[in-house]
Image: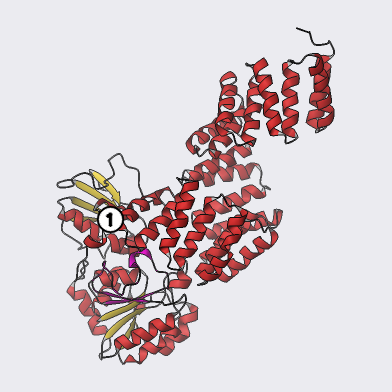
C-alpha cells in the first residue's frame, strides 16, 4: 500500500482549517489531492465526507463517510458524523445505528450523545431522548440547547411543569434567546397560565418580530380572555408575514369556528393541506371543521386519513372519539376517548400502584376510587357512574372539585365523597370519572338515567328559597352564558338582550347567572329578573334555589347538569354544533329524561331558539 506523503499531516491541518472557516472548495481540493495519492487515507476520507455534508450534499456525504468508517471502523467521530448525515436524509434507523456505534467507542462524548437525543426525539422515543439529554447536562451543566431539547422531550411526555423548569434553565443561560422565551410562553399557555406568559411573548417578539411561536402564543392568550376577533387578527398577521405558516392557517380556522363562521373556515382549509399535504394535522383540522358544521360522518373520513399517515396521532384519535360519540356510536367512542390522557394539557389518569379498573374485573366487595378530571359539569354528569359502582357491590370513593363537595354530601350511603385532592387511605382499583362509561360498557340503549334525578337537597334548604322568591306564575331559572374563558364560549353563550322576548310570558324569571358580564348588565336591569345570586356561595346553594323552581332554561353550562341531576325540568339552548353528549337531531337527551333540547338551526341563530321556546312557554 502506498504510504501517504510526509506533507500529509500539514495538508490535513490546512484542510481542517479551511473547513472550519467555511472555505469548502479549498478544503475539498486538498482532500482530493491526498486521496489521489492514497485512496484509503482515513482522515482525508472523513474530511471529504464532512465537506459534502457542509455543502448540503448529504447523499454524497453518506457514501464518503461510509468509506471512511470501513477504513477506520474504530473512529468514533466518523460514525458520529455518518449518523448526522443519515439524520439529515431522514434515514433514522441507520442514523441511530451509526450514533450508537460512535457512543459505544466513546461513551463520554457529549456531541454525538446530544445528536442521538435529537434523533430519538424525532423518532418519538422521548423517554430515551430525555436520558440522552440528561447525560449531556451531567457533563456540561451550561449546555443551553440540551436543557431546551430536554424540555421538548418532557413536554411530549406530558410533564409540563418539568418542561417549564428546563426551559427556564435554558433561558437563564441564554436570556436573549427568542426561541427560549417563546418556548417558556408556549408551556405557560399549555398550563393555562396565560398572564405569566405575556411578558415572555412580548420579549420574544421584541427580539424577533413576527416569530411564529410567539404570535401563536399571543393568539392563545387572547383566546383565553375571550378576545377572539383580536386573536383572529394576530393569526392573519402571522399568515400575511409567512403564508406558509401551517399553524397560522390552522389557528385561523379554529378561530373562525369559535366565532361562529365554520363555513368560512371550510373554504380556507385547502391552504393548510396545500402547505403540508402529508401532515396529519391538516386532515385533523379539516375533520374538525366538518364536525363544527355538524357533519361528523364526513369528519371521521378525514380523521381516518390522518391516522393512516400517523397511527398514533393523538389529536386525530381524540377528535375521532367526539365524532363517534356525537353519532351515538358510544362503544367505539368511549374506547377512542381513552387517548385523552396522552394529550399535553390533560391529566386524566393518575398513577397509583393499585390497578386501574377498565371493567374487566368484578368490583363487588372491592374498594373503587373514582376521581374527577375535567369541568364541574362533567363531574355532575358522570358522577352517576359512582352509583352504578355502588349498585355493583363496590365500596366507592368519589373525589369531586371543592365547589361541589357540599353538594355531594348526601350523595349515596355507600359512596364516600372526597375533595379533589383527597385520596382514600386504601383502595383496590381506581379510575378517572370519564373512563367509567367505557368500564360499564355504556351504549345508547343502557345509558344510566334517573327520571327524578340522582342528586338531593335537604328540604329545609329549599324551603328558604321558596320564601325568598316572588309569588306569581311559574318560577323559571335562567342561565345565558358560561365562563368567558371556555374555548367555545362565543358559540354556547348568548347575550341576555337576545332572550328578552321570553320575559313576556308572564312567569317569574329568576337569574341563576352567577357571573354577569359588563355587556349584559343593562339588559339584566331592564329584564326584571329576580336576582338572588349574591347569596349563592357554592353549588349546594344554587341547587337549593333550583329545587324551588318549576323550570330551568339554560345554555350548555354546569347549571344544566346540576338542574337535570336534581330532576328539575330543563330546557337546554344548544349552539349549532353542540357538545358530543347531546348527540344530533333530537329534542330529548337519553342522559336526562327531564331535559328538552332547543338547537340552533344555523351557526349563531339564537333567534329561532328563542322563538321556539317562547311558543313552548305558551299555556
Name the side, left or right, on which 381 lies relative to 602. left
Residue 504, percent from left and from top: 36, 92
Above-or-below relation of 367 to 326: above
Q: Residue 326: where, in percent of width, then height?
A: 36, 63
As helix, strand or loop, the secondary structure at mark 1 comes to helix
Q: Is residue 464 above or below residue 115?
A: below
- Residue that numbered label 1 is attached to: 437
Residue 373 image-quadrant placement: bottom left
Looking at the figure, which quarter contains the C terminus? Answer: bottom left
Residue 429 in the image, given as x and y percentages of width and height:
25, 45
Q: Quadrant of the N terminus?
A: top right
Q: As drawn, is 505 to the left or to the right of 392?
A: right
Task: Assess whether residue 308 is covered by the magenta stretch.
Answer: no
What residue range appears in magenta? 570-599
The image position of residue 421, as x and y in percent, is 33, 52
Nearest the viewer among 205 and 553 is 553
Q: Quick check: 342 above or below 59?
A: below
**Point 72% across, 28% down: residue:** 50
Could you say which is closer to the camera, residue 81 or residue 524?
Answer: 81
Amino acid at each position: 500500500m502506498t504510504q501517504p506523503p510526509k506533507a500529509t499531516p500539514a495538508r490535513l491541518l490546512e484542510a481542517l482549517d479551511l473547513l472550519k472557516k467555511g472555505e469548502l472548495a479549498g478544503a475539498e481540493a486538498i482532500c482530493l489531492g491526498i486521496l489521489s495519492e492514497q485512496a484509503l487515507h482515513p482522515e482525508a476520507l472523513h474530511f471529504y465526507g464532512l465537506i459534502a455534508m457542509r455543502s448540503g450534499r448529504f447523499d454524497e456525504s453518506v457514501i464518503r463517510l461510509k468509506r471512511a468508517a470501513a477504513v477506520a471502523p474504530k473512529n468514533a467521530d466518523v460514525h458520529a458524523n455518518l449518523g448526522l448525515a443519515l439524520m439529515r436524509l431522514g434515514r433514522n434507523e441507520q442514523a441511530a445505528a451509526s450514533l450508537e456505534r460512535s457512543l459505544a467507542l466513546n461513551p463520554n462524548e457529549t456531541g454525538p450523545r446530544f445528536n442521538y437525543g435529537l434523533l430519538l426525539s424525532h423518532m418519538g422515543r422521548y423517554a430515551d431522548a430525555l436520558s440522552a439529554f440528561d447525560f449531556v447536562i451531567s457533563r456540561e451543566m451550561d449546555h443551553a440547547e440540551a436543557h431546551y431539547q430536554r424540555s421538548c422531550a418532557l413536554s411530549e411526555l406530558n410533564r409540563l411543569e418539568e418542561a417549564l423548569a428546563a426551559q427556564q434553565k435554558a433561558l437563564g443561560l441564554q436570556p436573549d434567546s427568542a426561541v427560549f422565551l417563546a418556548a417558556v410562553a408556549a408551556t405557560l399557555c399549555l398550563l393555562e397560565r396565560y398572564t405569566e406568559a405575556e411578558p415572555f411573548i412580548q420579549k420574544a417578539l421584541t427580539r424577533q418580530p413576527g416569530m411564529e411561536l410567539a404570535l401563536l402564543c399571543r393568539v392563545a392568550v387572547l383566546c383565553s380572555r375571550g378576545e377572539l376577533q383580536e386573536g383572529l387578527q394576530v393569526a392573519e398577521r402571522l399568515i400575511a408575514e409567512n403564508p406558509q405558516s401551517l399553524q397560522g392557517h390552522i389557528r385561523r380556522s379554529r378561530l373562525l369556528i369559535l366565532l361562529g363562521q365554520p363555513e368560512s373556515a371550510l373554504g380556507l382549509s385547502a391552504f393548510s393541506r396545500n402547505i403540508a399535504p402529508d401532515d396529519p394535522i391538516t386532515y385533523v383540522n379539516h375533520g374538525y371543521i366538518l364536525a363544527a358544521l355538524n357533519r361528523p360522518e364526513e369528519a371521521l373520513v378525514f380523521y381516518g386519513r390522518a391516522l393512516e399517515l400517523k397511527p398514533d396521532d393523538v389529536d386525530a384519535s381524540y377528535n375521532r372519539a367526539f365524532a363517534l360519540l356525537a353519532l351515538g356510536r358510544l362503544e367505539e367512542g368511549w374506547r377512542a376517548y381513552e387517548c385523552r390522557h396522552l394529550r399535553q394539557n390533560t391529566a386524566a389518569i393518575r398513577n397509583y400502584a393499585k390497578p386501574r379498573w377498565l371493567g374487566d374485573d368484578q368490583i363487588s366487595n372491592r374498594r373503587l376510587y373514582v376521581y374527577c378530571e375535567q369541568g364541574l359539569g362533567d363531574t355532575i354528569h358522570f358522577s352517576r357512574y359512582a352509583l352504578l359502582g355502588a349498585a355493583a357491590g363496590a365500596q366507592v370513593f368519589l373525589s369531586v372539585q371543592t365547589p361541589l363537595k357540599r353538594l355531594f354530601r348526601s350523595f349515596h350511603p355507600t359512596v364516600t365523597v372526597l375533595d379533589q385532592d383527597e385520596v382514600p387511605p386504601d383502595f383496590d382499583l381506581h379510575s378517572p370519572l370519564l373512563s367509567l362509561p367505557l368500564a360499564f360498557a355504556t351504549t345508547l340503549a343502557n345509558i344510566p338515567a334517573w327520571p327524578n334525578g340522582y342528586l338531593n337537597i335537604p328540604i329545609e334548604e329549599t324551603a328558604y328559597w321558596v320564601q325568598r322568591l316572588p309569588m306569581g306564575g311559574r318560577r323559571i331559572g335562567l342561565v345565558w352564558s358560561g365562563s368567558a374563558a371556555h374555548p367555545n364560549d362565543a358559540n354556547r353563550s348568548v347575550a341576555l338582550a337576545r332572550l328578552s322576548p321570553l320575559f313576556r310570558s308572564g312567569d317569574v324569571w329568576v337569574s341563576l347567572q352567577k357571573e354577569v358580564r359588563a355587556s349584559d348588565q343593562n339588559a339584566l336591569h331592564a329584564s326584571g329578573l329576580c336576582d338572588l345570586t349574591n347569596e349563592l356561595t357554592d353549588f349546594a346553594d344554587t341547587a337549593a334555589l333550583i329545587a324551588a323552581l318549576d323550570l330551568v332554561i339554560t345554555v350548555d353550562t354546569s347549571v344544566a347538569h346540576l338542574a337535570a341531576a336534581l330532576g328539575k325540568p330543563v330546557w337546554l339552548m344548544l349552539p349549532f354544533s353542540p357538545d358530543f353528549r347531546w348527540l344530533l337531531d333530537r329534542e330529548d337527551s337519553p342522559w336526562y329524561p327531564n331535559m328538552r333540547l332547543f338547537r340552533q338551526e344555523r351557526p349563531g341563530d339564537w333567534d329561532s331558539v328563542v322563538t321556539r321556546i317562547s311558543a313552548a312557554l305558551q299555556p
